[in-house]
Image (cartoon, rainbow, N blue to C red):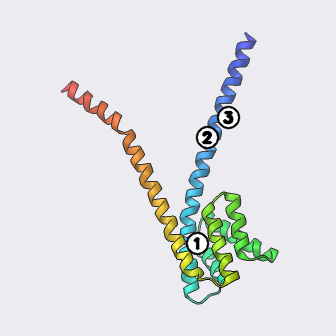
Amino acid sequence: PPLIVGWVAVALGTFLGLSRWVNVRRKATARRDEFRYALSAFCDLSSMNLAAGRGVSQALATAAGQGDGWAFMELRAALAAAYERGTPPAEGLEDLGAELEVDDLVEVAGSIRLAGQNGAAVRSTLASKARTIRDRLTADAERKAAAVTEKMGLPAAAVLMGLVAFY
């Protein structure tokens, strides 16, 4: 009957739509984590460029130019857009952080902005921020690994029981 076909179509469409939405959210989370790894490297490179005597803007541009991958392309584009608008590089990074929903980038931009306004020591701040990001990513990876290991307890016990039963 057409009514059953209609309900099945609506249910199947809802299921497929929700599964696609969950898949996109999972991929977005993975891309944000990938961006955080690149951001950690970017902070380290910026800190090294600052230690070499470059100014903040030049250090950021040089650090963004030294990396490959989509994350560094986004960083370069954000810095170039800020330069073209005539705004500080920190504002471009802050806009990118808000767009990608990466709070760490917004915090880095705030640190850079503070350095521009108050002459704060941005080199040590960037180095500590890179270390903090790496520590958080490591803790997340360890937590995920522990969760996966814990999920393997029941299948491993079932395999063991099967071996005992057939032995």
Relative to 133, is 44 above or below? below
Q: Residues within 10 Å of mark 1 (few under 14, many from 20)?
A: some
* SS at circle 3: helix
> Decide: marks 3, 2 in contact (CB < 8 A)?
no
The amino acid sitting under disc 2 is Val
Quarter assignment of residue 99: bottom right
- Which residue, as the protein is rendered here, is positioned at the far left? 167
Question: N-terminal of the two: label 3 or label 2?
Answer: 3
Label located before the other in sequence (2 or 1): 2
Instruction: List x then y, in percent, for residue 88.
Output: 74, 77
Quadrant for residue 74, please give it.
bottom right
User: Which residue is more in the foreground, 160 or 112?
Assistant: 112
Q: Which of 160 and 66 lies nearest the eye of the viewer?
A: 160
In the picture, which quadrant includes the C terminus? Answer: top left
Residue 57 in sight: no
Q: Which residue is mark 1?
A: 67
- Is disc 3 in contact with disc 1, using a CB cutoff of under 8 Å? no
Q: Residues within 10 Å of mark 3 (few under 14, many from 20)?
A: few
Q: Which amino acid type is marked by label 3?
A: Gly
Picture residue at 58% right of the left edge, 67% below the top? 39
Q: Report, in whole angstroms, how far the alpha carbon at label 3 lies from the one at label 2.
A: 9 Å
How far apart marks 3 and 1 lie (CA) works out to: 36 Å
Residue 149, position as x, y percentages in the image: 37, 44
Which residue matches tag 2? 22
Q: Is residue 52 above or below residue 134?
A: below
Is 88 drawn above or below residue 25 in the view shown? below
Quick one: quadrant of the N terminus? top right
The residue shown at (76%, 77%) is 83
* Residue at the outermost front position: 118
Residue 17 has which mark?
A: 3
